[in-house]
Image (cartoon, helix red, strand yellow):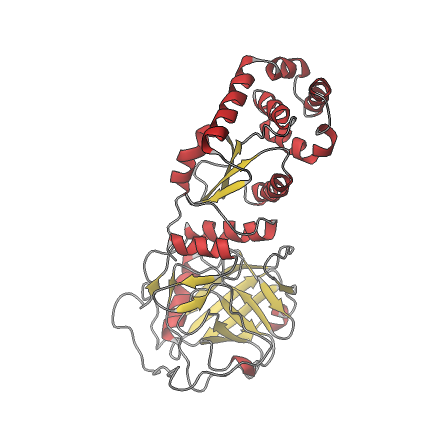
Amino acid sequence: MKSTSLMKIKSLHYGLLASFFILAACGTNLPSTTPVATPTASAVKPIQTDVSPTSNAMACMLVRGQATPEALGANFESRGHTSGPADAAVTIVEFSNYQCPACAFLDNSLRRIRQTHSTDVRLIYINTPSTSKNNDLLAMQAGEAADLQGKYWEMHDLLFDKRAEWSPLSSADFETWSARQAASLGLDETRFLEDYRGKVVAERLQQAVQSAGNQSIVPPILFVNSASPYTGQVDFPSLDTVVRMEALEAHQFSACPAWVIDPHKQYIATLRTDKGDATIQLFADKAPQAVNNFVFLARSGWYDGNTFYRVIPDVLAQTGDPSGTGIGNPGYFFATEITAGLHFNQPGMVAMDNNGLNTNGSRFFITLGPAPDMEGQYTIIGQVLSGLDGLKKLSPRDAKPGEDLPAGDKLIQVTIEEH
């Protein structure tokens, strides 16, 4: 994905992923319980089982994004308050103020982002005061005074949480109220009041008002790893998906996988999960590209700690995306391999997920029952030899756009044996 394509994902909220390799829906095209048409023989040609590598690298098409959190942070970090590490994979810039209702909704979502992604996200909050709302500047004044005692974010969150209390107060009553809140946060109340009335805070307010006026900014405005404003949904699940996808880019591969298997040897994968171990016989001779990719990713640690992001009892369990969104990829796509003689006619079949023909990446699923509607669409890479009962105990989970779900079970580690 180019960075412009990623912005389309954000602005359209699970729109179409532009790729010069294929036309693939970025919204996950996961195996369905509803029968779908099987591709014709002319659309999907069975792979020859005697295929062997002709080079040191597997054929694939790179689609890795190009996030620029460093540049975004350099433009704004001197103007606002920052939460999160400077080297975070994702930089979010928020222009906001304390009294606009939309700002409060956005900030609530971003507070959860700060808490959920404390190491992956650097949030830069830029006060953009509204002169039409009398107490907005007073709230900013309290935040800046708290900052001088190292408690900016604590006061920031409190001000948003208690908007209904302080919004109608007079200037004198607000000062008394804010001092009381400062004390509740463990600040020195006397020093807080001195700073609240002092020169440093007054200069910060003046700079914020001047900056907002010069740029004619109407908050809230959000930037996420881009110089273009974010225009997608701002509920927590939606922003969480965007952040996870952006953070994934730091781990994606910039080259096609090396060739690491011998298609004439046997490979056994062991999946350690929260519900026990499962062993899988991989079909290296029947789907060499997909098995090579699976072994390459497993040995690189790509699968370690992944979530089973979609589990439908008696149908399938799905994982293989470190972002946990179900739409992530390793930075490349490779061809679909449909092999005669391999079918979804029993539980325990392991196959690559895709967004359409020739868009295999890293996501894979394991059938928990017969799935004839999947025939001819997905590359089957193996079959469960043991541990299927444990896989059937994975917690049901089926995320929808905008839906907030609890954490799913984990794929702790994948190990590979070669025989």
Instruction: Identify the residue at image location x=51%, y=52%.
Output: 242
Instruction: Identify the residue at image location x=34%, y=83%.
Output: 48
Q: Is residue 78 above or below residue 30?
A: above
Quarter the C terminus occupies: bottom left
For the residue pair 7 and 86, the one nearer the viewer reads as 7
Instruction: Identify the residue at image location x=47%, y=68%.
Output: 269
Residue 56 lies, in percent from the top left, at 26, 66
Residue 340 lies, in percent from the top left, at 42, 86
Quarter the N terminus occupies: bottom left
Residue 239 lies, in percent from the top left, at 55, 49
**Farthest residue toward the left?**
55
Picture quadrant of residue 111: top right
Q: Is residue 325 left or right of residue 265?
A: right
For the residue pair 171 and 250, the one nearer the viewer reads as 171
Picture quadrant of residue 314: bottom right
Q: Is residue 4 above or below residue 24?
A: above
Does residue 72 show up?
Answer: yes
Q: Is residue 188 left or right of residue 57?
A: right
Residue 182 lies, in percent from the top left, at 68, 22
Q: Is residue 258 left or right of residue 140?
A: left
Q: Is residue 347 above or below residue 394?
A: below
Q: Is residue 158 left or right of residue 410?
A: right
Instruction: Identify the residue at image location x=43%, y=39%.
Output: 87
For the residue pair 298 and 65, the one nearer the viewer reads as 65
User: Total number of numbered labels?
Assistant: 0
